[in-house]
Amino acid sequence: MSGTKGARSRRFEGGLADVAQAMNASVDFDQRLLPHDVAGSTAHARMLAAVGVLTEADADAIADGLAQVRDQLASGALPWDPALEDVHMNVEARLIDAIGDAGRRLHTGRSRNDQVALDLRLYARAAVADLDARCATLQRALVEQAARHVDTLMPGYTHLQRAQPIRAAHHFLAYVEMLTRDRARLADAARRAAVSPLGSGALAATTFPIDRQQVAQALDLPDVTRNSLDAVGDRDFAIELVATCALIGVHLSRLGEELVLWTSQEFGFARLSDAWCSGSSLMPQKKNPDLAELLRAKVGRVVGAWVTLVTVVKGLPLAYNKDLQETQEPLYDAVETVAASLEVAAGMIGSLELDVAVLRAAVDRGYLVATELADYLVNKGAAFRDAHDIAGGLVRAAVAAGRELGELSLDELRAADPRFDADVATWLDPARAVDRRDVVGGPARGRILAEIARLRAQLGATS
Ligand code: ARG
């Protein structure tokens, strides 16, 4: 049995009611904070010794004891005790069991309120590092698919209607851009999380002559919080991180939807390897894109986590309230869901196989080069609105005749506008149509190759 009663001092006569303990305890989920709790406590103890509140011998015993308790709790050698409520009281109680009196001095000048705020900030920073690495892995997979498909033409869509020809590489690189912005948002969330609240106490700081900067430096946090009430009551950093996770989830859901479409028999644009598909329990022929569908769906719970978080914090009076414990599970769920989704997406993209012939056939049907006819006439002096109108008439005639634009004769084109000449044939070649879109951000071959080179240099080797 533990040598401490945790947070229940002699103030209390009896124990918590069973259902009260079940609702009050957070150790089932906040044990994720174990490494951060121990890092924070170690930095706190070292600082207390440096300012003369603890002896160096006590700080040494605490640091060694904490490392031992951490390893034993992490390995399962020591069980978590829900009667001790949370990760903080479990660690402290085990520390006191292990080293005795010195352990009872650790909590000097500190409260669980600034402690949990610190642990969650350290967790958020570590989560960002992990999510960022996973985003980069997915980006590399997308860039390598792009590199394989520089010369694969496919229809680009608006309204899910074939619109203009593009290079398949351009499509993959669009997702790389989304993830670049997501990574910038992650970095931003980490920057605001990386501020030390330790020293804020329960709400009104502490009477001990603590050195907040020393603790922050030991934990590699560039700054300390400036208001103790705000520091123990704030979970903005978690809300921001979950909002960023939700946006990553939104991007992955779009990717998932496109994988579902592309691998359908209706599109037939791509095949997923068996590692990323499931069978049907009833229909033997089925190969279902379950994982792509789950990528599409998982964002639901991440957005839900964000709604949970802001709803919990909304309307809370300063400073700490136990409500804030309820911000933890949605934070963990959002981070873990998006981490898994990023890994699945990277695996699926890495093994995706495009059907180049089907994509090309799709480019050749559906009047995708109609815009070229209009642009051609503009180059011959027509106003764009007139050229658009003339090209529209040609599409209409071609549709009526069941022919593609490239199948119209020069005479037929000339009948619509005498400015058409033999060189129009090169304009109707989809590959050339793509390469005329030679602006920054466009799908011309040179632009795509430059983007791939830029991104490869930026992202480093495929891991
Ligand atoms: N498990 C608690 C939480 O997550 C730790 C802080 C408890 N503080 C308190 N005053 N009861 O918020």
Image (tube, rainbow, N blue to C red):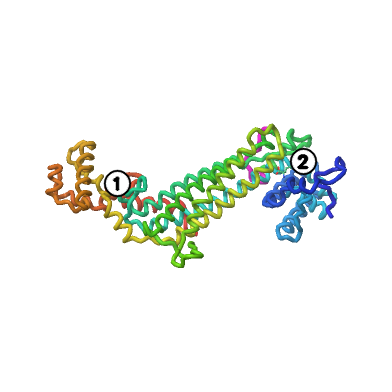
Mark 2 burial class by Cα count in 10 Å: few <14, some 14-19, many 20+? few
Q: Is residue 272 left or right of residue 223?
A: left
Task: Indicate whether 149 appears above or below 24.
Answer: below
The type of residue carrying mark 2 is Val
Image location of residue 375, percent across then percent down: 23, 43
What span is colored magenta in the figure?
Answer: 217-227
Q: Residue 225 in magenta?
A: yes
The quarter of the picture where residue 414 lies is: top left
Q: Residue 246 in magenta?
A: no
Image location of residue 407, percent across then percent down: 19, 53
Task: Indicate whether 256 appears above or below 319.
Answer: below
Image location of residue 331, percent across then percent down: 61, 46
Instruction: Quadrant for the N terminus, please.
Output: bottom right
The type of residue carrying mark 1 is Arg
Q: Secondary structure at mark 1?
A: loop
Name the dominant secondary structure of the magenta segment: loop
Q: Is residue 343 left or right of residue 422?
A: right
Q: Is residue 191 visible?
A: no
Total count of labels:
2
Q: Is mark 1 within 8 Å of ligand 1?
A: no
Q: Which residue is mark 1?
A: 437
